[in-house]
Image (tube, rainbow, N blue to C red):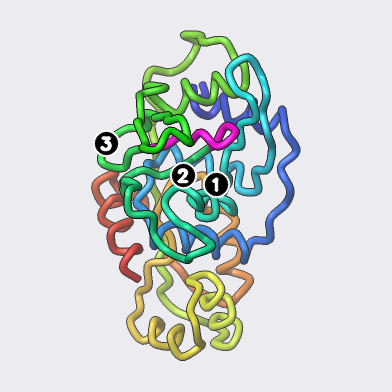
Amino acid sequence: MKSRLEQLLDELLRQIDIPAMEQAMSKQYKSQIRRRWELPADYWMLLERCCGLRTVWSNDTYEALELWGLDTLVKGQEGYAYNPVEQKVIKDWDEHLVVIASDAGDPYCLDLRRNDTAVFWAEHGAGTWDFQPAFDCLEDFLESVLDVPKTQEYETAYPYHYIRLIVTGISDTKKALVFLKQHFGDSSFQQTKDRLKELPLLIYSGLDTGTAPLENSLDRWGLMYEKQQISLEKFLEDQAYIRNL
């Protein structure tokens, strides 16, 4: 039986038409996000399944809610955490808050200091940000967006499976360099070559639902790899390591 979050994401995909996103571009956005934040696994599931999300909801709860996708999450912080005109960080913004959606300018955020996906809301234009609890979890937030009534027909816990992919060798150096440079967002091929000097190389750590496209790419671009199932603790360690790459 699917978890509550999985069912809501299925409904999200049913209600909207998500544009296709090129695999290389998807990897680039993931790399940017991982370098900036350590996001909850449930929110990563939303980003990976709805990577090209672009839509606006208007209902009894929201005037014009925009829910950020994989390619809009970083840009979605503009005007809140970052001033794009002056190209400066906005000092009065709490750096632990990540804006995941905006309703006519009012931000909905996750607080990365917490070990959950509680969603907080504040009214813009008030002079200072006064964030208040809006939803206890990401699922409650999505239910309000999709106008889905709350039910108890969900598993009480979803057995998340975390996977690690490690590059162990290369069969085609030129192809491998092109792919890895795009995947890591390296500024030069020399930087990518330096990575390959220290094999094995961690290339993915996350939910098992996100490995299939990457595995296909690794095979196609001439990289040999090892797949491991890991614990939540090891996944969290990997995220800290990836942010420092």
Foreground residue, 13 or 174? 13
Say which amino acid is labelled 2. Answer: Trp
Q: Which residue is mark 3?
A: 114
As drawn, the label of residue 48 is 1
Q: Position of residue 224 (x, y in %)?
A: 49, 73
As drawn, the label of residue 164 is none
Quadrant in which residue 42 is drawn: top left
Q: Measuring 46% from the left and 83% from the top, which residue is drawn there?
A: 192
Q: Which residue is mark 2?
A: 44
Q: Which residues are magenta?
A: 102-110
Q: Measuring 73% from the left and 48% from the top, which residue is drawn there?
A: 19
Instruction: Tell me which label, 3 or 1, sits earlier in the chain.
Output: 1
Instruction: Tell me which label, 2 or 3, sits earlier in the chain.
Output: 2
- In the rendered image, residue 233 lying in the magenta stretch gets the answer no
Q: Measuring 36% from the left and 86% from the top, which residue is drawn there?
A: 197
Foreground residue, 144 or 159? 144
- In the rendered image, residue 105 lying in the magenta stretch gets the answer yes
For the residue labelled by badge 3, is the local secondary structure a helix, a strand or a loop?
A: loop
